[in-house]
Image: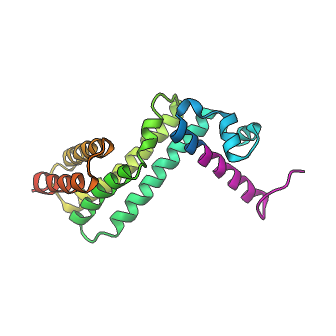
Amino acid sequence: MPRISAPTVVEHRALQREALVVAASDELLENGLAAVTPASVGKRAGLARSTIYEYFPSASDLVAEVALRSFQQWGEELSAAMAGAPSGIERLAAYITTTLRLVAEGKYDIVHALHGAVFSPEKIARFEEQHTELVQPLRDVIAELGLSHPEVRVELIQGVVDAGVKQVAAGRDVEKVSRLSVELVTQGFLN
């Protein structure tokens, strides 16, 4: 019987699964989508190639898990930053500045690395759900502020955030882009 590296089999399996997701993420970011193979991920994780199939039916499913984890981590950081802000305007600013900071820290790189990946319709639906969840805090802030045409405002503000993401991803100073984005939103869309 194989040796386990945790107090229980369940914990051991959770550790192995996590090691595979981390290895796949690292491989994806360092070497690109085509490099994420069962052999490369298994080697990086220190596990047999065949072990991957115990946790993920295919390399595509493993890559999808990497993407979903990325969404989840992004959402957790965004929620934490917004929870620490006292009012609607400050939470809105936290949404913008945190999003742009995460891009500057390289946490958006996964999106570029996934370009060209093919996923099942079920995975695509989960990605869309996750993306909707990432925008929900913005919707909540706009609702809290009681502004007219909330959905239009959300779309316009998200457009400014998306433009800021492109600027930061292109190497522009995150502090400057954040400041200008917050000013544009608070002075232009909230009055």
Q: Write the residue at 24% across / 60% down.
A: 93
Left or right of 90 on screen, residue 189 = left
Q: Write the residue at 58% across / 40% down.
A: 27
Q: Quadrant of the C terminus?
A: bottom left
Residue 15 in magenta stretch: yes
Please provide percent x and percent y for residue 35. 59, 32
Q: Quadrant of residue 182?
A: bottom left
Q: Across the whole image, how many numbered discs are drawn on residues? A: 0
Please provide percent x and percent y for residue 21. 61, 46
In the foreground, 109 or 191:
109
As drawn, 169 above or below 75: above
**Bounds of the magenta segment:** 1-23
In the foreground, 180 or 96:
180
The answer to whether residue 57 is visible is no
Q: Write the residue at 66% across / 36% down.
A: 40
The answer to whether residue 81 is visible is yes
